[in-house]
Image: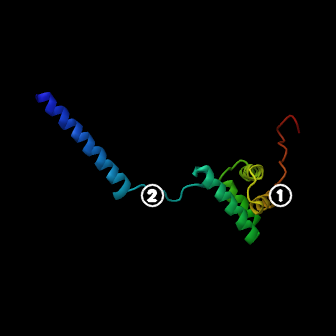
Amino acid sequence: MFWRKVGLAAALGLMAGAALGVAIGWWLWPVEYVNTAPDTLRRDYRDEYILMTATAYEVDGNLHRARERLRLLNPADPVAPLRDLAGRLAAAGGDPADVARLNHLLEKLSASSPLPTPNPLSEDG
């Protein structure tokens, strides 16, 4: 009889604790993400970020700012996310205006990319 009461009290305590934890975590003090980097976004939000970058470039014509925005997604190759999205949208039959916008920015970024400088210490150069 004693162990039955202990088991019931433990089960009720666990259920009350779980309910309280959910209430606190979801309603009283939910997590708020502030100043997160674009590379931590879900893929669909990353795609929107890339489209917004291409649209912003279309409006302001600031190629440096567009490159820096894309660099937040891929520091090593800022053009790669743009190229990937343009290819996926074109293959999926996406909005032609979006595809054109992405290709225009891709063309400008590719044309203005500095050529890699040869490493003087390498055996190739």
Residue 119 higher or lower than 4, as above or below: below
- Say what amino acid the circle numbered 2 marks: Glu
Q: Which residue is mark 2?
A: 32
Q: Position of residue 8 (x, y in %)?
A: 19, 35
Q: Residue furthest bottom?
A: 60
For marks 1 and 2, the one nearer the N-term is: 2
Q: Position of residue 27 (x, y in %)?
A: 36, 57
Left or right: 51 as drawn, with respect to 4: right
Quarter of the figure with residue 106: bottom right
- Say what amino acid the circle numbered 1 marks: Glu
Circle 1: is it few (<14), some (14-19), or many (20+) Cα within 10 Å? few
Q: Are marks 1 and 2 in contact (CB under 8 Å)?
A: no
User: In the drawing, what numbered circle is on residue 107?
Assistant: 1
Q: Relative to the observer, which residue lies in front, 55 or 119?
A: 55
Q: Position of residue 91 (x, y in %)?
A: 77, 49
Residue at (85%, 44%) from the top-left corner? 118
